[in-house]
Image (cartoon, rainbow, N blue to C red):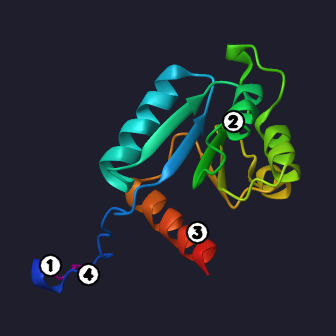
Amino acid sequence: MPLVKCGAKNAVGPAKLTAIEDSLKILIVDDVKMNRNMLRKRLTRFVNPSAVITEAFTGEEAIKVVTGKETHWDIIIMDQYMEEAGGVLIGTETVNIMREMGVTSIIVGCSGNDMKDEFLAAGCQLCWGKPMPANQFILAQLKDELLKASL
């Protein structure tokens, strides 16, 4: 069955979102330096060019960071398994501890395994798989969560 070729003027696609303009404080928690670097670059290039990003490589270090001088984080991105850095806590345990401590940041669980239910039960608002979703997907989700948090 032959198909009719459509012209570009008839093509409809999703609207391209623009980066978040307000500077955000973001904590990336991952034991693999390459993962932290890649995520840092994607966040500053496509999501929030003026973001202030801090990194932690274990759950234990992340807890120290959130209880340190800088007590407010807009977004925390949490890996699940961080054994390469020698950490004992896994991501979901770290999120549970943070929530018990009163951390109200948007927390994104991030794992190469299907951990969505576990991350959400621990207190995460979002869950991303590895490989990471497309930049526009990440941007849309974060904008939506930031809007909810401001209400």
Q: Is residue 3 magenta?
A: yes
The residue lying at 30 percent from left, 46 percent from top is: 45
Q: Which is in the foreground here, disc 4 or disc 2?
A: 2
| Mark 2 → mark 1, Cα distance in angstroms | 60 Å
**Which circle, 3 or 2, is nearer the viewer?**
2
Assess whether mark 2 and mark 3 are in contact (beta carbons under 8 angstroms). no
Which quadrant is the N terminus positioned in? bottom left
- For marks 1 and 4, the one nearer the N-term is 1
Q: Main secondary structure of the magenta part?
A: loop
Tell me the SS state at disc 2: loop
Q: Earlier in the sequence, mark 3 or mark 4?
A: 4
> What numbered label is drawn on residue 12?
4
What secondary structure is found at the residue carrying circle 3? helix
Residue 133 vs residue 94, the one in the foreground: 94
Expressed as whole percent of the image width and height from the top left, the position of residue 136 reads 39, 61
| Viewer-closest of 15 and 21 | 21
Q: Residues within 10 Å of mark 2 (few under 14, many from 20)?
A: few
